[in-house]
Image: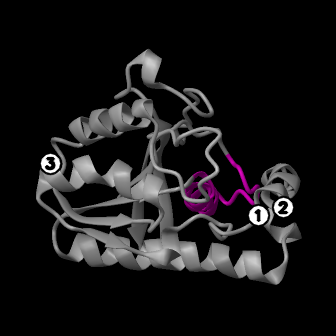
Amino acid sequence: MYLIRHGQALAGSEDLDPGLAAIGHRQALATADALAGMRVARLVVSPLRRTRETANPIAQAFGVAAELREEVAEVFAPDMPAEERVAMIGPFMAGRWGEQPDDLRAWRRRVVDTLIQLGLETAAQGGDLVVVSHYIAIGVAIGEALGDDRVVPVPMANCAITTIEAGHGGLTLVEACAVGHLPEDLVTGAGGAQLRPR
């Protein structure tokens, strides 16, 4: 499966569910082009606007409909007040899942279980799964595959592609946060850090 972080969202928007900035749309197009050789049979997308807009070029390129799934949405509710989100996001992202309250740990487990189920179902159909999601949800998959309890196990740029295999034994990381498909001027967010398992 290919897990794709959404493109860069509109910055400074009062909108609780912003769409993509102009550069985010260019990132999304470059990412769809990068998937051209894949056998995309299924496209699963967070319901938020920035992920749906990132998924649009992929859906068009492969003739697949985007399946909206809450299980791969952002960890925080989109209607959370901005000041509350700002106050908690830093400590949360610097933390570990074992330190989080029960509801957040349950959210993490649901992400992992959903990705394994979707990956197995799509593999049984003989195709590849693309999931367009968010920093924390993709970080959950990477952390699960690596046995890393950190909320943010690796930096992740906008439209970075993480490749993971799902099996009955769990998730196996192939490549995390690849940005080689993006021209340098389209790499935004956490930069170009990549992790290749040994």
Residue depicted at 34% across the width and 40% down the height:
28
Horizontal and vertical percent for residue 168?
A: 43, 78
In this view, the mark in front (3 or 1)? 1
Q: Is residue 19 above or below residue 65?
A: above
| Residue 149, magenta (yes or no) | yes
Residue depicted at 84% across the width and 71% down the height:
100
Q: Is residue 99 above or below residue 91?
A: below
Helix, strand or loop status at disc 1: loop
Horizontal and vertical percent for residue 19?
A: 46, 49
Please name the residue that numbered disc 1 is placed on.
81
Residue 119 visible? The answer is yes
Please name the residue that numbered disc 3 is placed on.
61
Give the quadrant of residue 68.
Answer: bottom left
Residues rendered magenta in the picture: 135-153
Residue 164 visible? The answer is no
State the residue in front, 7 or 103: 7
Q: Would residue 150 appear left or right of 56 to someone viewing this image?
A: right
Q: Would residue 64 appear left or right of 23 to someone viewing this image?
A: left
Tag 1: residue type?
Pro
State the residue in front, 6 or 147: 6
In this view, the mark in front (3 or 2)? 2
Mark on residue 84? Answer: 2
Tag 3: residue type?
Ala
| Residue 167, magenta (yes or no) | no
Tag 2: residue type?
Glu
* Quadrant assignment for the N terminus: bottom left
The reply to whether dot 2 and dot 1 touch (C-beta < 8 Å) is: yes
Whichever of callouts 3 and 1 sits on the residue coming sooner in the sequence is 3
Whichever of callouts 3 and 2 sits on the residue coming sooner in the sequence is 3
Q: Is residue 141 above or below residue 5?
A: below
Horizontal and vertical percent for residue 191?
A: 59, 27
